[in-house]
Amino acid sequence: MSEVLATRVVGNVGIIEIDSPPVNALSTAVRTAVIEGLRIHNADDAVAAIVLLCAGRTFFAGADIAEFDDLPIKQPDFDALMAAAESSAKPVVAAIHGTALGGGFELALACHYRVAVPSAKFGLPEVHLGILPGAGGTQRLPRLIGAAPALEMILSGKPVSAAKAAESGLIDQVVEEGKLEEAALAFAQNVVADGAALVKVRDKAVQGTVADLEPVKARHKRQFKGFKAPGHIVQAVEAAITLPFEQGLAREKELFGELLVSRESAAQRHVFFAQRQTAKVPDIGKDVPILPIRKVGVIGAGTMGGGITMNFLQAGIPVTLVEMKQEALDRGIATIRKNYERTAAKGRMTAEQVEQLMGLITPVLSMDELADVDLVIEAVFEEISIKRDIFGKLDGICRDGAILASNTSFLDLNEIAAATKSPEWVVGLHFFSPANVMPLLEVVRGAKTSREVIATVMKLAGTIKKTPVLAGVCHGFIANRIMEHLIVQSQQMALEGVPLRKIDQVMNDYGFAMGPISMLDLIGLDVLIHGAEGRTLMGDFVDAGRRGQKTGKGFYDYDADRKSALSDEAARIIADFAAYANVPQDPDQSDEQIMKRLLYPVVNEGAKCLEEGIALRASDIDVAAILGYNWPVFTGGPMFWGDTIGAKALLEGLEALEPRYGADFAPSALVRTLAAEGGRFTDR
C-alpha cells in the first residue's frame, strides 16, 4: 500500500483517500496511488461505488509541474490515470474541497460524478504556464458546459466557485461545508440505488460551433500576442467540436506536446517557480522571529504615499497618514476615496466597504503622531537630505523596535540609515507606481538591517499581496538599475536620428506592451528628471512644457483619448539637443541593432547585480523586470532570455557594440565566465 493512499469501505461504498502534502499534486506517486485505489475497490465485490477524496487542505491542486522538465512523463501518465477513473466498472464520485485545478480538475471530469463543498474552486490555469490542459480537459469540458464557455474558462485560467460550477453543470451537487465525506457517501449510495449509472463526460455531445468561439477569441485577443498557448487552446477546443472524442484527445495530446517543449512554456514555467522563490532568503530560517505589524505610518500623501496606504487598508491594517500641510493631506485623502468609489461604481466593492476602508486612515499633520506605529514608510521626494532629516526625526519619535522604511527608488539606503541611532531597524520598501496596483515590492537590505526586519517585511509583502524581491544597496537596486540602460539607450538613439516610432516598435515586436519612448511619456518626463544636474534632453522637453501624457505632449503629442502622434516641436527639441551634444547622426539602424542596444546592456547589468550580490539569484532579477517593468512573461525575463541567446552570443554582441557605444556595453565578468564555460545565468 502506498504511503499516500488509504482505502476503506463504508457500507457498499469504497473510499480512496489521498494524503500527499502540501496540495496533493498529481505526481507519479499520487497517480499510481489513485489507480491502485481504483483497482482495489473494483476488485471488491462488496463495493458498489467509489468515492475519491483528499486529506489536507485541498483536492488535487494540479500536476507536479517539476515533472514537465523531465520528459517523457513517467508511467502511469495522465492518460492512464484518466482512463482508470473513466473506465471504472463502478461509479466514481469525486468529492472536492479546496481547489480542483489543472490535472486535478481534469481527473474530476474523468470521474462519473462530482460533488463539492461551497468553498471549493475549479479551474484550468495551464495557460499561465504556457501549456494547455493536456489530460482531456479541452475535450471533456466543452462536452459538459459547451464549447464557448469552456474556451472562456481555459483561456482565462481563472477558477470558478462551487455555486457557479453547479449552475453550469460542472459539478452535480454542492454539499454542506465540513461534511464532504458524509455527503459524498450519501450521494454515491443514491447513485447505486438508482442503478449505478456510469455517466461519462466523453459520451456527451458538444454544444456549440466553431463560429461560437469567435467572440471569446475577440475578448482575449491581447493574450495571443507573443504567447503560443492561447492559439493552441483554440485549436484543441475546435477539435472537441469537429472530431470524435478519441481523435480530439489525440489532437489535444499533439498540441500539448508542442507547447511543452516550446521556449514560451519553458519561460512561463520558469517565471512560475521564480515568483515562488523570491521570498526565500538563505540566511533567514523559520527560527527568525516575525514582528507583528498592527499599525502603519506613511509619510507623504501624494501619488506614491496614497497608493502605499491603500495596500495596507485593503489588508485591514490601520494607517496614520502624515502630510505637512492640510491642503496636501485633504487632497491625498480625497484621491484615495475617489479610487475606492471608482471601484465601487464598477461593482467590485460596496459603499459600506468604502467607508470601512476610509475609516482605517488617521490623517495627521505631524510626525509626532507616529509614536505608536509598528512600521513607518517614508514616501517623499527623492532628495537624500530630506530623507535623512526625516529619519533623524523618526529616530526620536518612534518606539524602540519600530521598523523605519524608505520608499526610495535610487538613493543610498545606508546613508539614510546612518541618520538614525538604530540602522538595524531601517529597510528599503520600494513600491512601484501605481503602488496600489503594481505587484512588485523591492525589499532593500541595508548593511546593518536586522534579520528580524527582513523576515518581517518579506512576510508582510504577502499580506499586502505583493511579490517581494530582496535587493542589496546600490543605485537603482535591481529593477531600476537594469532597466535604466534601456531608457538611456532609447534616448541616445532618438538623438542619433532613429525614428521614435521605430524604437518603440522594435520593443513592441519583442513583446513589450509599450515601447520605451511611450513609457517615458506615460511616467512623466518631469518625474524622471527630478534631481538631475545639468542640461538633459528630457529637461529640454520639460522646459518646453512637454511633460508627457498628462500635459498632452511629450516625445509624442496626445489627443483626448491619449492616442499618440508625431510632433514637429518634439523633433526640433531632439535635433537641437543632438546638435548641442554633438551627437553623430545614424538614423538607419536595423531592428536587430536597436534590439541589441536596448536589451543586451540590461542582461549585462543583471549579471553585474549577481556578481555584486545585489540580487540573490538570477530568477529574482527576472521577477523584478516582469513585475516592475512589464517585461514580457513569455520571454522569461532578461536573465532567462539571456540564456536563450546564450552567454557566448551575448558576449560577442556586447564586444561588437562597446567600441562604438561605450561603457554600458563593457561585458561583465560573469558574462565572460559563462561564455567560456557554456553556463547559464538561471543556474545562479
Image (cartoon, rainbow, N blue to C red):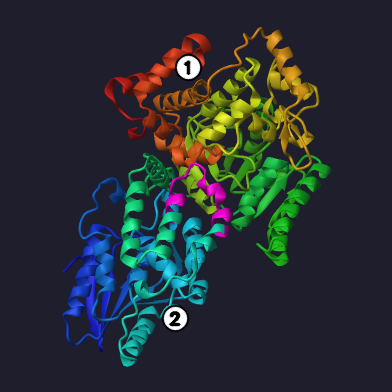
Report x, y in % for residue 566. Answer: 72, 28
Residue 579 occupies quadrant:
top right
Of residues 528 and 304, the one drawn nearer to the viewer in this rendering: 528
Query: What residue is at 32 percent from the left and 50 percent from the top?
Result: 257
Q: Identify the residue under disc 1.
A: 665
Q: Is residue 493 above or below residue 458?
A: above
Q: Residues within 10 Å of mark 1 (few under 14, many from 20)?
A: many
Q: Quadrant of the C terminus?
A: top left
Q: Looking at numbered disc 2 in the image, what kind of residue is underneath it? A: Val
Query: What residue is at 21 percent from the left and 64 percent from the top?
Result: 32
Q: SS of the residue at dot 1?
A: helix
Instruction: Reply yes or no: does residue 229 show up in magenta.
Output: yes
Q: Which residues are magenta?
A: 215-233
- Residue 42 in view (yes/no): yes
* Prevailing secondary structure class for the magenta stretch in the rendered image: helix
Q: Quadrant of the N terminus?
A: bottom left
Of residues 530 and 201, the one drawn nearer to the viewer in this rendering: 201
Q: Identify the residue under disc 2.
A: 175
Q: Is residue 108 above or below residue 443?
A: below
Q: SS of the residue at dot 2?
A: loop
Report x, y in % for residue 556. Answer: 72, 29
Of residues 651 and 329, the one drawn nearer to the viewer in this rendering: 651
Determine the CA span between mark 2 and mark 1. 63 Å
- Tell me if 75 is positioned left or right of 104 in this view: left
